[in-house]
Image (tube, helix red, strand yellow):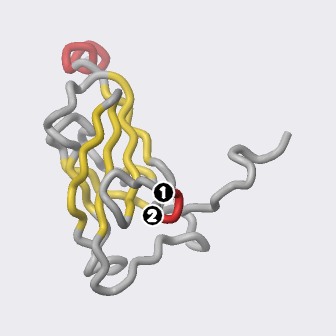
Amino acid sequence: NPPFPNPAPHLPSSAVAAGTASVAPGATVQLNFTDVENQPRFEAGGEYFAVWYHGLNVVNVPLDVSAWPAVPLQVTVPDEFDGKGLVAMVVATEQGAPTLESIVTAPSLFLQQPEALGAVFSI
């Protein structure tokens, strides 16, 4: 089977950093880029956004990358989301990440769950 997508964009992928307590709406999440050979590249003075997708909703949040990599990137899951389902986020140079060229990182996926269900499974 060929790699998917083909051709693969080889964008840096991120994971939620260890010790993250929640990925619920309103939570602040630290991104961990685990592949030391494939780290995001940010231009000094460039404008960057965390572009969030949930259902048909797209939310753009300005992202401060000025101190990266000395200071890890932190993003806040938008309060507009309902806390259910799957949320995707990319770092991009343009709001909405309208082109492949504007996308800086591979999508990060955040599994949301109803709070009550989380309480049942935390027992």
Assess whether mark 1 and mark 2 are in contact (beta carbons under 8 angstroms). yes
Q: Position of residue 55 (x, y in %)?
A: 35, 27
Instruction: Where is residue 32? Give x, y as percent.
Output: 41, 60
Instruction: Please tell me which residue lies in front, 111 or 60.
Output: 60
- Which amino acid is tagged 2? Ser
The percent position of residue 82, horizontal first and vertical second, equals 20, 25
> For residue 4, what is the image quadrant?
top right
Give the residue type at disc 1. Thr
Above or below for 3 versus 101: above
Please give left or right for residue 37 compared with residue 25 in the image. Answer: right
User: How far apart, in angstroms, are the residues tagged by discs 2 and 1?
Assistant: 5 Å
Q: Which residue is mark 1?
A: 99
Q: Residue, x 29% and y 40% (percent of image)? A: 58
Pointer 2: residues within 10 angstroms few (<14), some, or many (20+)?
A: some
Q: Nearer the viewer, residue 95 or 72?
A: 95
Please provide percent x and percent y for residue 24.
22, 34
Would residue 109 be found to the left or right of residue 2 on screen?
A: left
113 displayed left or right of 16: left
List the single residue furthest toward the right: 1
Circle 1 packing at 10 Å, graded few (<14), some (14-19), many (20+), is few
Q: Determine the residue positioned at 69% across, 55% down.
A: 8
Q: Quadrant of the N terminus?
A: top right
Specify the farthest residue to the front.
98
Q: Which residue is mark 2?
A: 102
